[in-house]
Amino acid sequence: MVTTPAAPSASPGDVVRLVAVQDTALSIDEVVAALDHPAAGGVDLFIGRVRDHDGGQEVGALEYTAHPGALAALHEVAAEVAAEFDVEALAVVHRTGALEVGDLAVVLGTAAAHRGVAFDATRALIDRLKARVPIWKHQRYADGSDSWVGTP
């Protein structure tokens, strides 16, 4: 599910341009396009990729699983950040399913009149997503072991 209002406006709901949890490959271009706004002098983008290690162990692959309420929680976090920070646009997309090392897991960003606001809003968005959106990571290690990350 994706939110894409037609025209920018000052209300937080219209600032939130793209919110999705999907089991298909993520597009950096789609997120950047959603952040386009003529008043934005700064656009900050965060790209989270699957890395080849965690906690001293070699990661071979992983799988993200989302609770049925994950999209609603992501919308809530996005609206909260949009209301708190003076941003012109905000976009966030998280991947689910099986991913390999190097795959994109999350792409998000903000656009604001000034870079400092964009930096701060983007950090708040990823930090709150990780803390509050029920998406869990099942890591499979090279030695055959595995672990769940981010589960309650």
Image (cartoon, rainbow, N blue to C red):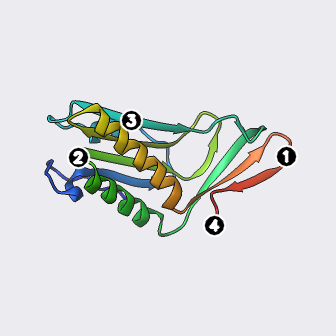
Q: Is residue 5 above or below residue 60?
A: below
Which residue is label 4 attached to? Answer: 152
From mark 3 to mark 1, how far is it between C-alphas?
Answer: 34 Å
Residue 144 numbered tag: 1
Which residue is label 3 attached to? Answer: 45
Identify the amino acid type marked 2.
Asp
Q: Report the mark closest to the observer, 4 or 2.
A: 2
From mark 2 to mark 3, how far is it between C-alphas?
Answer: 16 Å
Residue 72 numbered tag: none
Q: Residue furthest bottom?
A: 69
Considering the numbered disc 4 on the image, is that residue within a helix, a strand or a loop?
loop
Of pointers 4 and 1, the one earlier in the residue sequence:
1
Q: Report the mark closest to the observer, 2 or 1.
A: 2
Identify the amino acid type marked 1.
Gly
Q: Report the mark closest to the observer, 4 or 1.
A: 4
Looking at the picture, tell me which residue is in the foreground, 42 or 97: 42
Q: Report the mark closest to the observer, 3 or 1.
A: 3
From mark 4 to mark 1, how far is it between C-alphas?
Answer: 24 Å
Q: Is residue 38 above or below residue 64?
A: above
From mark 4 to mark 2, how far is it between C-alphas?
Answer: 32 Å
Residue 47: x and y, percent?
A: 47, 36
- Residue 60 placement, left or right of 5: right
Identify the amino acid type marked 4.
Pro
Of pointers 4 and 3, the one earlier in the residue sequence:
3
